[in-house]
Image: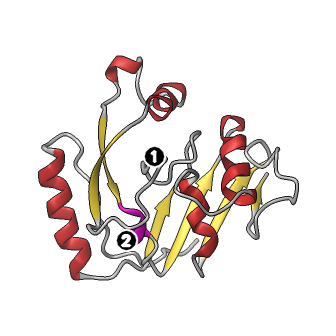
Amino acid sequence: MQPLGIREYHLLDGLGDPDKMARKMSAELAAKPVQLAFCGIGENGHLAFNDPPADFEAPHPYIVVDLDELCRRQQVGEGWFESIEDVPRRAITISIPWLMRAGEIVCVVPDRRKAEAVKACFEGPVSPMAPGSILRVHPNAHIFLDRDSAALLESGAPAAATLE
């Protein structure tokens, strides 16, 4: 296996002031174009914590968002937090317009709990109500589904690989 050659990356510090971190990361992201972005789609169709209805025209690279109840419950269901009370109500995320500026996007969407969202994102209209649907208009987005998350798709996996 050979290294990918990723020399610069941007990680978020979620323990500090979220507004300050969003401003700091926005300045970094605005200074250099993103070549590769990694993201996921949530049970409610959220894309990188942009819950529905997502702002497809947000002007800033990083934003602080309020997490809806389904998104917060997903964090417990995936084992990131022990209880809903432990899940933050706000999160820092890349905005949809800035995510879409990335040269390449890799989106991994595992789990049966996400099957309805996958169906809405890839067989429904491109819509802020299914934020992950915006990936369909990106020229270089790679969507990786497992059999469970792809289970409800009538047309099979969306022009991408389905993981075993």
Question: In this figure, which residue is indicated by the disc labeled 2?
Answer: 98
Q: For residue 18, which numbered disc appears in the image?
A: none
Q: Nearer the viewer, residue 9 or 57?
A: 57
Amino acid bearing label 2: Trp
Is the magenta region chiefly helix, strand or loop? helix
For label 1, the SS is: loop
Q: Position of residue 138 (x, y in %)?
A: 57, 76
Q: Nearer the viewer, residue 78 or 155?
A: 155
How far apart in space, not on screen, are marks 1 and 2 (Cα)? 16 Å
For label 2, the SS is: helix
Q: Is residue 41 left or right of residue 51?
A: right
**Residue 115 forms part of the magenta stretch:** no
Location of the N terminus (image quadrant): bottom right
**Residue 96 forms part of the magenta stretch:** yes
Region in magenta: 95-99
Question: In this figure, which residue is indicated by the disc labeled 1?
Answer: 51
